[in-house]
Image (cartoon, helix red, strand yellow):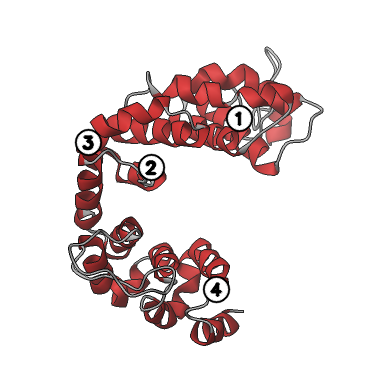
Amino acid sequence: MLPGIRRLLVDSAGKEGLRPVLAALASWGPAASGAVPELVSTLATRNVRWACDALGGIGPASAPAADVLGRFARGVAQPPRHDGGTPLLHGVRRWHGAQNAAWAHWRITGDPQVFLAFAEDAASRGLRGADLGRLAELGPRATRCATALRPFLESPGPWTRVRAAHAWWRITGDTDAAVPVLLAALEPLRAGDADGPCRAAVRYTARLGAPAAGAAPLLEAALSSDRRFPADVYLAARAALAAFGDVPADGHRAAPGAPGPGEGCADSAA
């Protein structure tokens, strides 16, 4: 499949229809490393922002792109506009995909300084439009962004609140502010629903572990419900309950006094 995609990257480099292909390559990660030469060329087209994500997803094998990504992130160079127009003059306005380039530079080089400088500069201006999921990846290194991040825990948008809660915890280690936001996002499970923010909240409670154990009753109810949830909800809910210490990773709670998995009678273990 990859040879055909590489040909497509050459033939359709500047076409808007290529963007779903670039998004797919980003999800492939290092498996897409064979397409790096074509992706580097795509940085000179209107699809540059999507190419940044694909190159960052691939990681160190995208090293040939590191220098140009660093220039885009710092504003030293401007790529083509997403509508195909002429690049803006340097210093007029920051390129809208600079955070994609900064994140990709970090994933490729392992050096967070370009991305961290971008994040801190964005925080000084209010973090509007910042990718909170990628900010979370910086963890405690992004401590100087915490003050600007805090108001997003009360954003009117559920996606923003959930991502901000996860980023807040990753950056500050504070669960007191993050957990209530995540528990509130789980409420759709009561009605047999699981929208995007709810599903993300289930995953994040698994990462928080014991401090988010207040979610256990609702997650257990979802696992035993007759309602059908997306498959990732079941996987994440079981992982969360295991992280809370309530149940093993297979999602089955042992009855009081009953042996857990791998704790059968002596002759069954022989």
User: Which numbered disc, 4 or 2, marks the residue closer to the eye?
Assistant: 4
Work out whether 10 lies above or below 20: below
Q: What kind of element bears circle 3?
A: helix
- Marks 4 and 2, the one that precedes in the sequence: 4
Q: Are marks 2 and 1 in contact (CB under 8 Å)?
A: no
Q: Quadrant of the N terminus?
A: bottom right
Residue 92 position in % (x across, y down) = 21, 62
Residue that label 2 marks? 132
Q: Are marks 1 and 3 in contact (CB under 8 Å)?
A: no
User: Which numbered disc, 4 or 1, marks the residue closer to the eye?
Assistant: 4
Residue 153 position in % (x across, y down) = 40, 27
Left or right of 127, for residue 208: right
Q: Are marks 4 and 3 in contact (CB under 8 Å)?
A: no
- Marks 2 and 1, the one that precedes in the sequence: 2
Residue type indicated by callout 4: Leu
Seen at 44% across and 37% down, the residue is: 163
- Marks 3 and 2, the one that precedes in the sequence: 2
Say which quarter of the image contains residue 104.
bottom left
